[in-house]
Image (cartoon, rainbow, N blue to C red):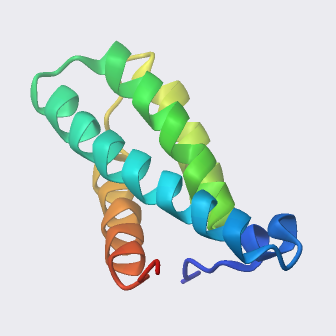
Amino acid sequence: MEEPNLSYIKNIAEDDLDFEKILLMVLKEEFYEEQASYRNNFSDNNLKETSLIVHKLKHKIGLLGLEKSYELATLFENQLKNSDTNLHESFIEILNKIHVFLSKIKIE
C-alpha cells in the first residue's frame, strides 16, 4: 500500500526551506482540524457536510503523494452525496496513516 511522503511538497518548495516549513505547518494544522470535523460530522450522520470535508482532505492526501488514496477520497466524496458510506472504513485508514505520518514530522 502507498505511504505518505513529502516529495510533492519538496518539489513545489524548490529548496526553499522556510516555504516548506510554512506548508507543513498549515498542512498539519488544517489536517488535524478537518480530521476531527470529519469524524464529528460522520458520527452525526451529516453526510452533506462530511462530503465537503472529504473534499478538503483529499487535497491534503494529494499533497502527500497518495494517488490511489486521492482517487478513493474522490469516489467517497461523491458517494457521500448519495448517502453511501461504504468507503468510510477505508477512508479512516487513510486518515490514520496520514495522522501517524504527520505526527512524526518535527517543524523547527
Pick the residue in front: 88 or 67. 67
Horizontal relation, residue 32 to residue 78: left or right: left
Horizontal relation, residue 23 to residue 96: left or right: right
Q: Quadrant of residue 49?
A: top left
Q: Position of residue 39 (x, y in %)?
A: 19, 40
Compared to residue 65, the image places residue 30 above or below, namely above
**Residue at the image position 45 percent from the left and 23 percent from the top:** 52
Q: Quadrant of residue 55?
A: top right
Horizontal relation, residue 6 to residue 87: left or right: right
Compared to residue 62, the image places residue 17 above or below, namely below
Q: Residue furthest left?
A: 44
Q: Position of residue 6 (x, y in %)?
A: 66, 78
Q: Position of residue 21 (x, y in %)?
A: 60, 69
Q: How many marks?
A: 0
**Residue at the image position 22 percent from the left and 43 percent from the top:** 36
Looking at the rendered image, the quarter that the N terminus falls into is bottom right
Pick the residue in front: 93 or 30. 30
Look at the image and tell me whether residue 36 can be seen.
yes
Pick the residue in front: 25 or 5. 25
**Residue at the image position 42 percent from the left and 45 percent from the top:** 30
**Residue at the image position 54 percent from the left and 26 percent from the top:** 78
